[in-house]
Image (cartoon, rainbow, N blue to C red):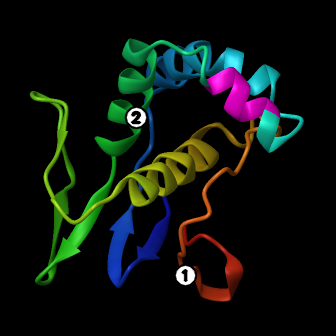
């Protein structure tokens, strides 16, 4: 769906299934209701359970691939809910998650916030499809 470069690493996001889109949206509704401002999003995010956060982040990151020596490698191990790369920090994790959400849910939820401030480069300021 999209390619994004973060800290010199190239990533690809993937497409959520229709059912995963539904369940991710259901878990994000408290956050989306506060999407009027970053402060509202942060306040709403504080009310989301750890289980729901893990579900949303895990679903999104399970779709992300990283270019590694000419091939694409999954960054998420769904079996143990853990990143496969130790150099991915929280900012990068949130950036990849929000990019995946925007690509998958953006057409249906225009209020989806962009809360990432992690540096990324997107050719021509656009995500590549």
17 relative to 121 in the view: left or right: left
**Quarter of the figure with residue 32:** top right
Task: State the image coordinates of residue 14 (x, y, percent, origin top left).
Answer: 40, 50
Q: What is the CA distance from the residue labelled 1 to the residue labelled 2? A: 21 Å
- Does residue 116 appear left or right of residue 110 in this picture? left
Can residue 87 be found in the magenta stretch? no
Place of residue 100 in the rendered image (x, y in percent of width and height, measured from the top left): 50, 48
Point out the stretch of residues depicted in magenta. Answer: 40-45
User: Who's the residue at 81% across and 40% down the image?
Assistant: 110
Whether residue 118 is situated above or below residue 121 in the rendered picture: above
Give above or below for 66 relative to 46: below
Residue 52: give x, y in percent of width and height: 44, 16
State which tag comes first along the sequence, 1 or 2.
Answer: 2
Camera-side residue of 128 and 33: 33
Q: Residue at x 36, y 25 (%)?
A: 54
Numbered circle sitting on residue 121: 1
Question: Which residue is disc 2 drawn over?
Answer: 57
């Amino acid at each position: 769906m999209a390619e994004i470069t973060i800290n010199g690493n190239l990533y690809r996001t993937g497409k959520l299934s229709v059912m995963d889109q539904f369940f991710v949206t259901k878990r994000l509704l408290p956050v989306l209701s506060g999407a009027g401002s970053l402060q509202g999003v942060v306040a709403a995010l504080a009310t989301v359970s750890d289980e729901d956060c893990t579900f949303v982040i895990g679903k999104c990151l399970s779709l992300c691939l990283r270019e590694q020596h000419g091939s694409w490698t999954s960054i998420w191990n769904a079996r143990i809910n853990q990143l496969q790369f130790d150099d991915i920090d929280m900012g990068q994790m949130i950036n990849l998650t929000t990019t995946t959400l925007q690509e998958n849910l953006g057409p249906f939820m225009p209020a989806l916030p962009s809360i990432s401030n992690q540096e990324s480069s997107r050719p021509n300021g656009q995500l590549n499809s």
